[in-house]
Image (spheres, helix red, strand yellow):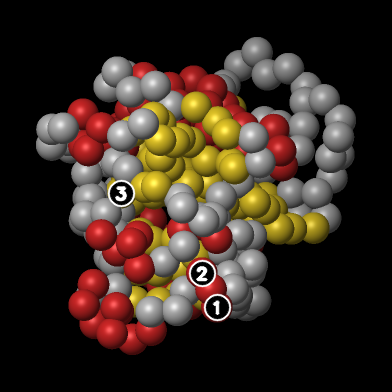
Amino acid sequence: MSLADGEYQGHDFPGQGSEPLPTPTPQAGTLVRFSQPIPYAEAWTLQKQLQEERIAERQGDVLLLLEHSPVYTLGRTTQPAHWDCGGEVLRRTGASLQSVDRGGSITFHGPGQVVGYPILKLSHYCSGPKQYVRKLEEVLIHTLLRWGIEGYRLEKKPGVWVRWNHADAKIAAIGVRIDHGVTIHGFALNVDLDLSPFSHIMPCGLTQCHITSMAEVRQSALSSSVVAQQIAQEFARIFNIQWTSLPPDIMRQEHHDHHLTSTSPLQT
């Protein structure tokens, strides 16, 4: 996926600019939580399949929560100055490199960072992409508050920031795309991970962008699994969704079987 910060790319979004209708009863959604880090390519294939099926109204809304194997992802606005360390850094960090179709520049994902991919019909929840990004920020800010961490927004620098070592430090990234009114990509919250891979890049294309994690701010180890569950709860509250949990293996098998039997194969 990946995340480059509050920027979005997309087309064919119906009703942009209109106010959302009130939703007195929760929307139904499927929550899929992965217990082990997975390669970026696998998550991307699943995202695209889910998005195509959501556009075609063959399924409902889904939130994937997971951690990635180490990977740098390059968004559409990545410039050479944002990424100039080459193959040696990849060998040293053990990270792969992936170009993605979201907005924004380069970022890093790895174990200890909770990544969320909401596949939603946006008009059910928001008046447009900007409100969607702000709602994602709100989910993360309220999750941080559960741990006594004050997260906030910065003007023209989407994502979530905290005060650390007397400076603004980025603790969560957001980068989305919207096609035919359905969201893809999402957010990444730094829970308890090795932050050194960020030192080799210009994260999100921002100069002097300090990166931190919940564990660094609290000066104690944290469980990514616990934080992921809290994100799911805050997401359900803020977006007014009632989750039904689905194990990842069942999700994988369902979409593998559909891909094999479909007369119009999904694009991956």
Where does residue 36 sit, x and y in percent of width and height? Answer: 21, 56
Classed neighbour count for the residue bearing mark 3: other residues with Cα under 10 Å, few (<14), some (14–19), many (≥20)? many
Residue type at mark 2?
His
**Mark seen at residue 20:** none
Query: Label 3's element?
Result: strand
For the residue pair 261 and 249, the one nearer the viewer reads as 249
Where does residue 134 sit, x and y in percent of width and height? Answer: 62, 32
Query: Label 1's element?
Result: helix
* Residue named by callout 1: 80
Q: Which label's residue is closer to the chain start, 1 or 3?
A: 1
Cα gap from disc 1 to disc 2, whole angstroms: 5 Å
> Where on the picture, by quarter, is residue 120?
top right
**Mark seen at residue 113:** 3
Cα gap from disc 3 to disc 2, whole angstroms: 21 Å
Residue type at mark 1?
Pro
Q: Which label's residue is closer to the chain start, 3 or 2?
A: 2
Residue drawn 46% across the image and 62% down it: 202
Q: Is label 3 or label 2 in front?
A: 2
Q: Quick check: can you spot residue 59?
A: no
Q: Is residue 116 left or right of residue 164?
A: right
* Residue named by callout 2: 82
Where does residue 107 sit, x and y in percent of width and height? Answer: 44, 61
Q: Is residue 78 left or right of residue 115?
A: right
Marks 1 and 2 close (CB-CB < 8 Å): yes
Classed neighbour count for the residue bearing mark 1: other residues with Cα under 10 Å, few (<14), some (14–19), many (≥20)? few
Residue drawn 55% across the image and 60% down it: 205
Marks 3 and 2 close (CB-CB < 8 Å): no
Quadrant holding the C terminus: bottom right
